[in-house]
């Protein structure tokens, strides 16, 4: 459909609605973009029996598996993020994700012994990479790589690159939590920041960006309630339980969506104070924190402009 010369194309991929916006009507291009996304989804998914990542998982403790360059490079990137000291990012978190089943039928709080057993097979250093052969070996039986925390960012960047190759200077791709903008139509793109645990269209604010990625991760996205407590899908690989701190959501603004994926997880693990301190060393990465106490905290505003939409929240600008 079109709206003031903007054409929108949508489908469902990777378990999420996918939206493409272009400034010219081109159904063929939209179809090629969606096919590109599906090609990468088929390589990375762990929600089906067959994919290159599942080949690695099926061979855990037995043998190495040679994979394609995109799969190898993404796994290498994910391992590097996982090896950061005290990182909340862990590419080997698959056994814990499957144990909790958050967002799937049958989710419940696992027993402490089951969690401890899974933690023993989620060590990222047990993912052995061979750059020459492009092979991956999981040294312990039962290990499973899960790239769910990073795949959308990688794919969003590949779509951006493909659109540039096709001569598209202005556009937007939304992979459900990962928004990658191209160009600066009429000045800026306006992206909403969702209000946690509210109606789908309720916002705490909006940001204006150009040629940037906007990635949001929130405890409200997938969760269940048991024994009077809410259990969300952002697991802490250090404890085996959902991360429990002051945060409801983190939005990362960066050039690449891949960085956005990595930093939303890292920042969730660090919390506001340590997260802001870490971002002072990375001027190209910025964050918007939304807390359980109804604070909106901006690490800085070098690459975007924020407009508050909900007066029940307290806006704090920690410009560095």
Image: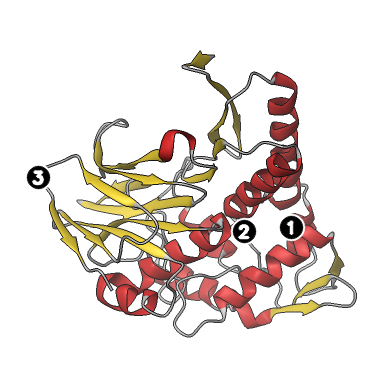
Return the x and y of residue 39 as percentages of the image width and height.
76, 41
The residue at the point 60 percent across, 69 percent down is: 92
Q: Earlier in the sequence, mark 2 or mark 3?
A: 2
Q: Is residue 154 left or right of residue 188?
A: right
Query: CB under 8 Å between callouts 2 and 1?
Result: yes
Quadrant of residue 208 within the rendered picture:
top left
Return the x and y of residue 78 as percentages of the image width and height.
62, 69
Dot 3: element:
loop
The residue at the point 52 percent across, 49 percent down is: 211
How many C-alpha atoms fall within 10 Å of the one at disc 2: few (<14), some, or many (≥20)?
Answer: many
User: Which residue occupies the foreground of this view, 258 or 266?
Assistant: 258
The residue at the point 51 percent across, 75 percent down is: 119
Q: Name the outermost residue toward the right.
A: 133
Q: Nearer the viewer, mark 2 or mark 3?
A: 3
Q: Earlier in the sequence, mark 1 or mark 3?
A: 1
User: Which residue in the protein does label 1 denote?
Assistant: 53
User: Which residue in the protein does label 2 denote?
Assistant: 147
How many C-alpha atoms fall within 10 Å of the one at disc 3: few (<14), some, or many (≥20)?
Answer: few
Distance from disc 2 to disc 3, alpha carbons, whole Å, reads 36 Å
Quadrant of residue 314 within the rendered picture:
bottom left
Determine whether 298 is above or below 17 in the image: below
Residue 312: give its label: 3
Return the x and y of residue 253 as percentages of the image width and height.
43, 57
Q: Name the outermost residue toward the top.
A: 1
The residue at the point 29 percent across, 66 percent down is: 299
Q: Name the outermost residue toward the front.
A: 187
User: Which residue occupies the foreground of this view, 126 or 204?
Assistant: 204
How many C-alpha atoms fall within 10 Å of the one at disc 1: few (<14), some, or many (≥20)?
Answer: many
């Amino acid at each position: 459909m079109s709206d003031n010369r903007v054409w929108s194309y949508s489908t469902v991929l990777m378990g999420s609605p996918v939206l493409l916006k272009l400034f010219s009507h081109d159904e063929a291009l939209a179809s090629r973009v969606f096919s590109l996304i599906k090609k990468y989804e088929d390589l990375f998914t762990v929600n089906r029996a067959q994919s290159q990542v599942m080949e690695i998982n099926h061979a855990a403790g037995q043998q190495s598996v040679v994979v394609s360059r995109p799969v190898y490079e993404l796994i290498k990137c994910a391992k590097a993020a996982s090896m950061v000291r005290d990182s909340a990012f862990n590419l080997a978190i698959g056994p814990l994700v499957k144990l909790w089943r958050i967002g799937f039928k049958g989710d419940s709080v696992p027993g402490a012994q089951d969690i401890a057993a899974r933690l023993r097979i989620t060590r990222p250093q047990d993912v052995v990479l061979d750059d020459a052969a492009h092979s991956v070996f999981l040294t312990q039986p039962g290990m499973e790589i899960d790239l769910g925390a990073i795949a959308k960012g990688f794919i969003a960047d590949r779509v951006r690159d493909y659109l540039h190759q096709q001569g598209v200077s202005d556009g937007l791709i939304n992979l459900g939590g990962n928004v990658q903008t191209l160009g600066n139509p009429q000045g800026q793109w306006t992206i909403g920041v969702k209000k946690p645990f509210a109606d789908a269209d309720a916002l705490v604010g909006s940001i204006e960006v150009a040629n940037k990625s906007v990635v949001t991760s929130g405890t409200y996205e997938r969760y269940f309630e048991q024994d009077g407590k809410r259990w969300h899908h952002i697991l802490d690989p250090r404890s085996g339980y959902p991360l429990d701190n002051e945060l409801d959501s983190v939005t990362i603004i960066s050039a690449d969506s891949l960085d956005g994926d990595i930093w939303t997880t890292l920042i969730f693990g660090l919390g506001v104070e340590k997260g802001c301190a870490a971002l002072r060393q990375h001027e190209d990465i910025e964050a918007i924190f939304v807390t359980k106490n109804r604070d909106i905290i901006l690490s800085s505003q070098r690459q975007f402009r924020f407009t508050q939409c909900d007066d029940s929240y307290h806006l704090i600008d920690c410009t560095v």
